Image (tube, grey):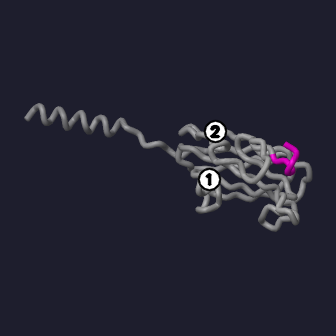
Amino acid sequence: MLRNLTALFLLCLSAAGARAAGPARLELVITGFQRIRGQVLVQLSASAAQYARKADPVRRLAAPVTGETVTLAFEGLPPGEYAISVVHDENGNGKLDTNFFGMPTEAFGFSGDPVVKRGRPAFESVKFALAESGGTIRVRVAPYGSR
């Protein structure tokens, strides 16, 4: 009986000491705006499917471009792996504009600042880990072909 009570006490003690991962804050610093107009569109993804736009992203943000740098924050995120896509929507139409050949005509960027030759870089090359304590990610937007 005493052994059972001791085991129950230890189990309760370990459960009380275990802490679920709390919500984290991710600060996003976006640089490289060559034209101070329009808005910045941000997509935060936690999987390759979300990143490839085959599933809804974790979050989306839009904010006016008021200077060469725009700082935004995602609040209440669970720790884990994420990827960020950014578009400088200069004309405010809510999407990345392209030319007749499908090449982007507005600046864009990704977490990890990968070199973009054709299409979106792979999720694996742009993902990053967000710790329980939160973090800051920097993304540089640039026109297609300038990286």
Q: Residues within 10 Å of mark 1 (few under 14, many from 20)?
A: many
Q: Residue at (53%, 43%) from the top-left corner?
A: 79
| Residue receiving disc 1 | 45
Question: Residues at badges 2 and 1 in contact (C-beta under 8 Å)?
Answer: no
What segment carries the magenta color? 141-147
Residue type at the position of mark 2: Gly
Q: Residue at (17%, 32%) from the top-left corner?
A: 6
Q: Which mark is residue 143?
A: none
Q: Is residue 81 above or below residue 57?
A: above
Which image quarter is the C terminus in? Answer: top right
Task: Tell me residue 36's x, y (percent).
Answer: 90, 53
Task: Tell me residue 123's x, y (percent).
Answer: 64, 48
Depth order, front residue of 121/93 = 121
Q: Is residue 18 above or below residue 96?
A: above
Q: Residue at (63%, 38%) from the top-left corner?
A: 135
Task: Tell me residue 30's x, y (percent).
Answer: 78, 46
- Measure how far apart labels 2 and 1 are at the Cα level: 16 Å
